[in-house]
């Protein structure tokens, strides 16, 4: 089947390129490496109950005991898997993808998605047909458990609720008809915020907006911030792990900037600490770390890689350029509800507008592009590229990232699912950014043509 796992779990268009048979085999193969006590949770997609019934049966058939957490966010399942001492979990979700998609994220006992190496082991067992079925008297049992209250109660302990309540923070939450409707409004209310909501009805068709929280999809959030005079707003993806912040003016705060803001606040209290982020993230994060004698630990692209680096090195804060923030003092995974209460805490402490705090963060211009390239020559192309350019800093942990003396950088990263390179670039000047991308595009295309 090739790569079964993508950047975040297994997903596809349900009943077309992703079938129940595939998902059941993924569940059984994963459980073989996780253990006997497995949590199962689901998002609000229309196909999620069907998948839940199927993979629960698959797990029972190989002797696993299933703890059905029902409708939950991914970070809720992750946190509660660890808290309850379970052997692992399966979260049924396709995150931000369109409604016809679904999939599963495989969670280890520590409440973080399984490492890349273990994904490979699962794929090998999957290709072999999965583990054997249990005898009739060794079939597993199922227990339904309600975990939302415990998760929210623990999460809000991370902030000063009295301070937030006294600050009179107003927030707008657009949960996009997804499962964040079950966590974010409640958590924000419990810490003393005045909460306004949009698209909170659970609906797997996502009638309010697309499940991806892009600025284009968040018009209703922007309007409600304006009409209520709120201090900030947050738009969530389908399973509640990623979020996009909007300031009091209705301007979107991109993931890099939101990580810079939270890192600045965190490092002010914890100088010298390390921030974890992928090589595709802004150099601005490094500038923020330098303010506080901190450092940046760069990883491959993917939230799994960031979270795993945090766990392995005892780092407490990580994030991605797509809006995922991992707050380790609670749990080292992306969590949009955690971001909501942290932002309320920051604004209550600073007593200034969010737009002012964002303005203080380093400002850079970022761009993205794609270059078509046959899969079989990708590695050779990258090898030749490194030899053809003169960059003082070359990072090859995930594709090739070239950083120049003026701080401009470009990342040429092979897609894991398509015959193309993905390009990420950043510069302090918009015109220089365009030239940076165009120059390297021409070099890469020349190399590809020479290998054709």
Image (tube, rainbow, N blue to C red):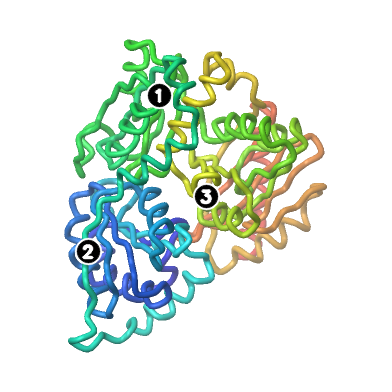
Circle 1 residue:
233
Asked if residue 58 lies left or right of residue 296, the reply is: left
* Residue 435 visible in the current orientation: no
Mark 1 lies on a secondary structure that is strand
**Which one is nearer the viewer's eye here, 152 or 400?**
152
Determine the CA span between mark 2 and mark 3. 27 Å
Percent coordinates x, y for residue 112 in the rendering: 47, 57
- Please tell me which residue is depicted at 68% across the width and 42% down the height of the picture: 439
311 up-or-down from 168: above or below: below
State yes or no: discs 3 and 1 in contact (Cβ < 8 Å): no
Q: Quadrant of the C terminus?
A: bottom right
Percent coordinates x, y for residue 110 in the rendering: 48, 61
394 up-or-down from 171: above or below: below
Q: Residues within 10 Å of mark 3 (few under 14, many from 20)?
A: many
- Number of numbered discs on residues: 3
Label number found at residue 143:
2
Q: Nearer the viewer, mark 3 or mark 1?
A: 3
Label number found at residue 49:
none
Determine the CA span between mark 3 and mark 1. 23 Å
Q: Residues within 10 Å of mark 1 (few under 14, many from 20)?
A: many
- Please tell me which residue is depicted at 22% across the width and 55% down the height of the picture: 48
Percent coordinates x, y for residue 431 in the rendering: 66, 27
Label number found at residue 332:
3
Mark 2 lies on a secondary structure that is strand
* Residue 304 visible in the current orientation: yes
Badge 3 or badge 1: first in the primary sequence: 1
**Which one is nearer the viewer's eye here, 107 or 178?**
107
* Farthest residue, direction front: 162
**Image-quadrant location for residue 217:** top left
**Which one is nearer the viewer's eye here, 375 or 84?**
84
414 up-or-down from 317: above or below: below
């Amino acid at each position: 089947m090739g790569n079964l796992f993508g950047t975040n779990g297994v997903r596809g268009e349900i009943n077309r390129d992703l079938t129940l048979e595939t998902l059941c085999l993924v569940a059984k193969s994963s459980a073989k490496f996780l253990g006997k006590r497995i949590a199962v949770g689901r998002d609000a997609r229309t196909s999620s109950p069907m998948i839940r019934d199927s993979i629960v049966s698959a797990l029972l058939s190989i002797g696993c005991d299933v703890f059905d957490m029902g409708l939950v966010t991914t970070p809720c399942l992750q946190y509660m898997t660890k808290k309850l001492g379970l052997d692992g979990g399966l979260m049924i979700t396709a995150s931000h993808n369109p409604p016809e998609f679904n999939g599963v994220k495989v969670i280890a006992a520590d409440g973080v998605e399984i490492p890349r190496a273990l994904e490979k082991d699962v794929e090998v067992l999957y290709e072999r047909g999965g583990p054997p079925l249990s005898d009739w008297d060794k079939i597993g049992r199922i227990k339904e458990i309600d975990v939302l209250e415990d998760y929210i109660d623990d999460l809000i302990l991370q902030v000063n609720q009295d301070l937030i309540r006294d600050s009179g923070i107003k927030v707008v939450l657009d949960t996009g008809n997804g499962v964040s409707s079950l966590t974010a409004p409640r958590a924000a209310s419990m810490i003393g915020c005045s909460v306004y909501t949009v698209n909170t009805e659970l609906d797997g068709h996502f009638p309010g907006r697309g499940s991806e929280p892009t600025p284009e999809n968040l018009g209703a959030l922007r309007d409600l911030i304006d009409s209520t005079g709120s201090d900030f707003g947050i738009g969530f993806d389908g399973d509640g792990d990623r979020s996009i912040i909007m300031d009091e003016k209705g301007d979107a705060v991109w993931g890099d900037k939101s990580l810079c803001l939270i890192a600045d606040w965190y490092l002010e209290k914890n100088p010298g600490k390390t921030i974890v982020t992928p090589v595709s993230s802004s150099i601005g994060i490094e500038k923020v770390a330098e303010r506080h004698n901190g450092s940046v630990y760069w990883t491959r692209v993917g939230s799994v890689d960031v979270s795993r680096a945090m766990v392995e090195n005892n780092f407490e804060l990580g994030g991605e350029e797509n809006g995922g923030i991992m707050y380790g003092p609670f749990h080292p995974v992306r969590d949009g509800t955690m971001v909501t209460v942290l932002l309320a805490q920051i604004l209550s402490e600073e007593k200034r507008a969010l737009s002012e705090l964002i303005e203080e963060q380093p400002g850079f211009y970022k761009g993205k592009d794609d270059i078509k390239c046959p899969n079989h020559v990708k590695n050779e192309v990258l090898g030749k590229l490194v030899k053809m350019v003169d960059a003082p800093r070359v990072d090859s942990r995930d594709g090739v990232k070239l950083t120049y003396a003026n701080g401009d950088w470009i990342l040429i990263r092979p897609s894991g699912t398509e015959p193309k390179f993905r390009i990420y670039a950043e510069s302090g000047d918009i015109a220089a950014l365009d030239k940076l991308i165009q120059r390297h595009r021409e070099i890469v295309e020349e190399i590809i043509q020479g290998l054709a």
